[in-house]
Image: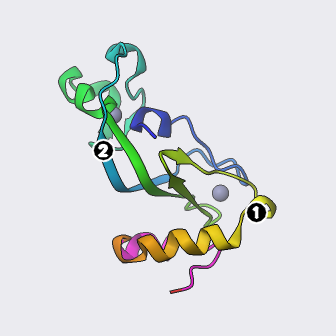
Amino acid sequence: MRYYFFELLACPICKNPNLLLHPIIEEKRSVTVDVERVRCRRWCSLYWRNAEETPLDLCKDCVHRDIVEGVIVCPNCGRWYPIVSSIPVMINDKYRNPKEDADFMRRNISRIPENVKREMRIPRIIE
Ligand SMILES: [Zn+2]
Ligand SMILES: [Zn+2]
């Protein structure tokens, strides 16, 4: 998932658009895109700054980064969503696969900081 895609997301349950992103594995993957057209618009979660005031040179670096594995957290309802194989898996509770969630957590729990884990309330993390 690219950083510029992240700001387009909202929580599928409570519709909150102010989500938190915690990248775990990132890869540089060059893409032939018009940087000015695709770059972050409002907020760049890579540089953690207002996108409008971000120099285009920084955006060039941003658009080439692909988040292969990571966590998206909704601080409003406490749900967390995994990014697996570069895809943010943002689905309704009833379609979640508890085994896949558990596998994801087993792989990544040690790489998620405590302050992020505290926000991840649904589903519950089994450590
Ligand atoms: Zn950006
Ligand atoms: Zn939510």
The residue drawn where x is 32% and y is 49% is 26
- Can residue 27 be spotted in the picture? yes
Is 123 displayed left or right of 35 in the figure? right
Start and end of the magenta stretch? 113-126
Total marks in image: 2
Q: Choose between 11 and 69: the one closer to the eye.
A: 69
Give the answer, above or below, for where 54 lies relative to 66: above
Give the answer, above or below, for where 94 lies relative to 11: below
Q: CA distance from mark 2 to mark 1?
A: 29 Å
The residue drawn where x is 23% and y is 21% is 56
The quarter of the displayed image where residue 9 is located = top right
Looking at the image, which residue sits at the far bottom? 127
Which residue in the protein does label 2 denote? 27
Q: Choose between 108 and 19: the one closer to the eye.
A: 108
Looking at the image, which residue sits at the far right? 94
**Residue 114 counted in the magenta span:** yes
Q: Looking at the image, tell me whether mark 2 or mark 1 is earlier in sequence order.
A: 2
Q: Quadrant of ligand 1?
A: top left
Is 116 displayed left or right of 90 in the figure? left
Name the amino acid, label 1.
Asp
Crowd around label 1: few <14 · some 14–19 · many ≥20 (10 Å): few
Name the amino acid, label 2.
Glu
Q: Which mark is residue 93?
A: 1
Q: Position of residue 84 (x, y in %)?
A: 51, 53
Cβ atoms at labels 2 and 1 below 8 Å apart: no
